[in-house]
Image (cartoon, rainbow, N blue to C red):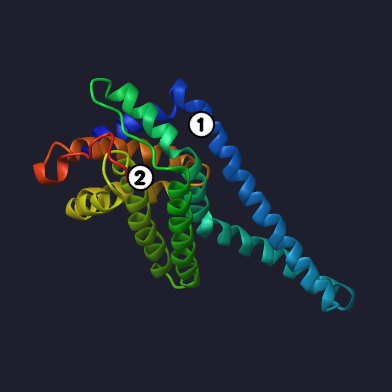
Amino acid sequence: MLIQAAYGALRQVFSAPLRAILWKSLALTVGLLLLIWFGLTRLIQWFQASHHISADYPVLDTLAYFLAGAGLFVALAYIMPAVSILVAGFFLDDAAEIVERTDFPGEPPGRALPTGTALLYALRFAGLALLVNLAALILFFVPVVGLVAFFAANAYLLSREYFETAAARFRSLDEAAAMRRHFGGTTLAAGCLLAGMMVVPVVNLLTPLFGIALMVHVHKALSRRGPALATPVAPERIR
């Protein structure tokens, strides 16, 4: 089931309807990362200038700036999940609707969360992702442990974010969370696939759209199991 869902999601990411969303998502993600990079490098320059490092130790200044740049690159890799989750909040419902309409044409489409709820939901997950990945960054220099912590944290966070977003188009937020917990093994396996994408440069920029497309397929497949959890909320139901 997961392999079929991944294939369907990959096909959707590069399909014509999703390409416009893909480019907007990439542009916003890269723009935010560049803005963060710019802000942090200016902060480093200010610190060096305020402590007269440039004037007193020019060689040390150059070395420090180089090492800081390399450190920022590592730091940005660790905050990428938080940035992608934040970006995803603006596009996930549109992408999910396209996937539902094209891959499941005979089934009723879901309903987007209210704008305010969706934004708060994305901000909450982005903040949680940032905290977890900063904790993983602290363990970066511990062999193996740092990478395992990064992978495990993002497998959980990404599976939770994207599955509940896909499921909440048909269920209340509480029901979506309950369904994710009930099928925890399957959703976490899908999250591991997304976390694997996160460690591959450039490919990780595709994670938001691939993630929601994947979880739309996973949610549809899991909805055919267990009647108690499979019954969606009525279209007129207000969340």
Tell me: residue 234, above or below residue 45. above
Residue 226 visible in image: no
Left or right placement of residue 97 versus residue 3 in this view: right
Q: Could you say whether the residue bearing mark 1 is in a helix, strand or loop? A: helix
Q: Residue 207 appears in which quarter of the rendering?
A: top left
Occupied quadrant, residue 169 = top left
Foreground pick, 148 / 205:
205
Residue in the picture at 46% in, 72% down: 139
| Residue that mark 2 sits on | 165
Q: What x and y, as percent, mark residue 212?
A: 37, 39
Label 1 to label 2, Cα distance in Å? 17 Å
Q: Is residue 31 left or right of residue 119?
A: right
The crowd level at tag 2 (other Cα within 10 Å; few <14, some 14-19, many 20+) is: many
Q: Which residue is mark 1?
A: 21
Amino acid marked by disc 2: Thr
| In the rendered image, the vertical position of residue 97 relative to residue 44, given as above or below | above
* Foreground: disc 1 or disc 2: 2
